[in-house]
Image (tube, rainbow, N blue to C red):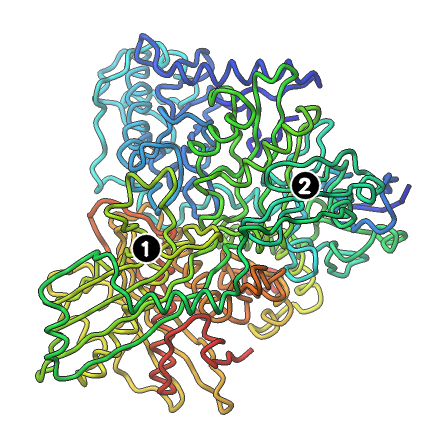
Amino acid sequence: MQTIKVNGRTHRVDVDADTPVLWVIRDELGLTGTKFGCGVAACGACTVHVDGTPMRSCQLTVEDAAGSDVRTIEAIDGPVAKAVQDAWRKLDVVQCGYCQSGQIMQAISLLESNRQPSDEDIDSEMGGNACRCATYQRIRAAIHLASKTLEA
Amino acid sequence: MRPTSSPHTPLLSPEAPTDTTRRGFLIGSAAAAGALIVGFGSSGRFAVAGDSRLVPNPFVGVLSDNTVVVIAKHFEMGQGTTTGLATIIAEELDADWADVKVEFAPANTKIYANLLFGAQGTGGSTAIANSFDQYRQAGAMARDLLVRAAAKTWNVPASEITVSSGTLSHASGKSSRFGALVKTASELVLAAEPKLKSPSDYKLIGKEGVPRKDSVAKTNGTANFAIDVKLDDMVYAVVARPPRFGGKVKSFNDKGARAVKGVVDVQQIPQGVVVYAKNTWGAIKGREALEVVWDNDGAEGRSSDAIMAEHHAKLDKPGRVARNDGQADEALAGAAKKIRADFSLPLLAHAPMEPLNCVIRVNLDNTAAEVWDGCQFPSLAQPTIARILGMKPDQVFINTVYAGGSFGRRATPTSDYHAQAAEAVKAIGGRYPVKLMWTREDDLRGGYYRPMFAERIEAGVDEAGKPVAWKHSLAGKSILIGTFFENALVKDGIDSTSVEGGNTLPYAIPNLRVDVRNTEMPIPVLWWRAVGHTHTAFTTEIAIDMLAEAAEQDPVAFRLSLLERHPRHAGVLKLATEKAGWGTALDKGRGRGVAVHESFNSFVAQVVEVTANADGEIKVDRVVCAVDCGIVINPDVVRAQMEGGVGYGLGAAMRNKITLTDGQVDQENFPDYEPLRISDMPKVEVHIVNSTEKPTGVGEPGVPPIAPALANAIFAATGKRITSQPFTDADITFAS
């Protein structure tokens, strides 16, 4: 039995200690907004916030996450999260949408630490989040829009 | 549990089973599927009864709470089709866009056929093109019933009733939302031919500010993909497959696999060895612990370099002639100036973000199955699954859910991953529902690649710089020979998807020959977003640039001089180059390149601007794109598809290839099949031609021009001609 705190609730799950948090939240807890894309931290689809820091949940074992607070797309809130989600909708960023939970989680972290990111800041911070539909131009625009909303 | 992204009760799909007896829900599913097959009842109305909803046809329903449900016969892989289909119905219905919801149609070839295929499936950028009239009529039919219901209720002439944003009104002051009239409307007889709107009255079609229907669910984690489906007692299955295409299982030892926590079974199927576990991680670890001895007899053992060399060698031999105007050989011999280029295009994986997966459960007496899939081609998947399970196609109910990308990969003539999932269910006697899971490694190594192609173009101009001859030779594996599609799309051994774009070269050249050689290999190949155009646009649009250079003419003026009979090509070429400032000076080290190409009846031109920095590294700065896709349903979706097409084609052209060493795929995961990243994405500007032509597709046509336009821009900036992909193999380094 492993113990994991997700979205403010503590769960006991019957999995091996080396099970990635990704599979615990998806298969055991039914929180499927966080996606599997590569399993090797090369696409960012599985990005969650761990104690407020964006992390690839495919690389974090349930054992190593013990004692941490994991937050997923299903439980994001606050002004930054709202500004990001609103901007994504306003600009219709999504296409297939599969990577977008991870993109949004990463974008929220970017704006939490940098309220006025430049294109270069965005490219740098979002560089690990792949989108095969190539919605990148709109991701950049949406982050700028969210930044403006937060400034206002 | 039947997950659904719609908050209301599904209109035409089976109800969610609330109990856990699998027999119970499947009887429900089969009954619902049966009702759909009945189709139109004796009254002419679609055979779904109920006084709380108006269902005049299989494409639209209006509920008593004012919700308008549009049934999408096409799946959504991100291309915006669900939004487009909903727009068409909402327009004719004069619905309030906020009231419109979309559901996916069940598998039913008769009712939900793609009218251009005669089968239910999405591809070839046909979704809007084949549905436009059908969905307009469907919407108009519902509107007509609501108008007559209001007329009857208010005792006024129907002709005096207006409809706007989901509300019917009469000058007397009476008005009603749709919902209150549903019961009365459902009792009326359908009009034979409801009147369609004049395009000048459109409020949604072609307008800005009509948001996508899937944006909210795809930004809060609730959008439902097949990988998200979880059923009671479901097991997760991963398959150990032969490392070489055409290989087979010789023997295996599952002792280690069965010892892994969560593993519940291990079984051999025709495609390999399946490890079943209670969760995905257990299945993946179980497969790692599995020992399999492979039989490589007859399997691919060559390396991709050797295969490519064989392709090139074939170009020196005669091919099957796909087009033959005039006397190309004689004219070329007599040309004043000639160009010749040999091109190499690699195998490419589609690599959609959602690794392929599929959920199937069967009932206890094996008389019905239910499938969850981002299903691109129900008319292929349904009979394939049915055959493996020993059922009739209509015993297999398909729940189509959002697809996390496809780019063509989800529609294989063999329904490869559906077949694997069905075999996996069958191998455990249907004891558990099965979710077949592919990892990214399975995806990149799973075959069904864009075929590799070797091509050669030789062409010549006369003394005045006018083209006199063009010879285009191709060698590649046919996608369609040996498949369900061969009869329709292969003639005299020429697969239309091998030569498309090449044999339809629009330029006025009097002596022109295109010929193709079909190559053989055990590696399965497939349509990859824009199919044959992905290689023919590359080779022809680079060659035409070379010919312009030989003729000492500007690449745009040269093309335009040869497009007099192709005004839509010329139109997008003029628009893109004008918007890009073609001809204006650029700083040293910068360059512009252009390409224009028609695919799937849409016309796209792109101008690429690059900068070569001091180290010679290339940065793609800007792409100006013009598109003519006839009547535009949603301009923002058109722009999004052009942006995405540019990005998809760009990433592949820059650095993607699938290679083999001694028959085994070298690439493993994204680190060695590196997708386009945000820092690689140029600024993309899209300009849409205002048109009254029939609507055509936009999912694919943005892809073909980008690679040749980039190659031509790099030539303009550096003087280096690129004739192979990926460009990194042509010694091009891209600035990070």
Question: Where is residue B540 drawn, in percent x and y?
Answer: 27, 68
Chain of the residue displaying label 2? B
* Residue B68 at x, y percent in the picture: 43, 28
The residue that appears at 21% across and 22% down in the rendered structure is B193
Question: How dense is the environment of label 2, judged by Cα within 10 Å: few (below 14), some, or many (20 and up)?
Answer: many
Q: Quadrant of the C terminus of chain B?
A: bottom right
Q: Under tag 2, what secondary structure? A: strand
Q: Give the numbered dot on residue B612.
A: none
Residue B619 picture location, percent across and down: 47, 79
Amino acid carrying label 2: it is Val
Classify 10 Å Cα crowding around label 1: few (below 14), some (14-19), many (20 and above).
Answer: many
Left or right, A15 with respect to B501, comes to: right
Q: Nearer the viewer, residue B426 or B53?
A: B426
Q: Say which residue appears at 50% left-offset and 65% top-offset.
A: B304
Left or right of B38: which side holds B375? right
Question: Nearer the observer, disc 1 or disc 2?
Answer: 2
Name the one closer to the observer, B654 or B614: B654
The answer to whether tags 1 and 2 share a subunit is yes
Query: Which residue is denoted by mark 2 in the rendering?
Result: B273
For the point 55% across and 55% down, the residue is A87
Q: Would you place residue B655 above or below residue B428 in this image?
A: below
Q: Is residue B551 above or below residue A74?
A: below
Considering the numbered disc 1 on the image, is that residue within a helix, a strand or a loop?
Answer: helix
Q: Residue at (38%, 29%) from the top-left corner?
A: B166
In the picture, the disc for residue B498 is 1
Q: Is residue B578 visible?
A: no
Q: Amino acid at mark 1?
A: Ser
Q: Position of residue A55 (x, y in %)?
A: 74, 59
Q: Quadrant of the N terminus of chain B?
A: top right
Dot 1 or dot 2: first in sequence order is 2
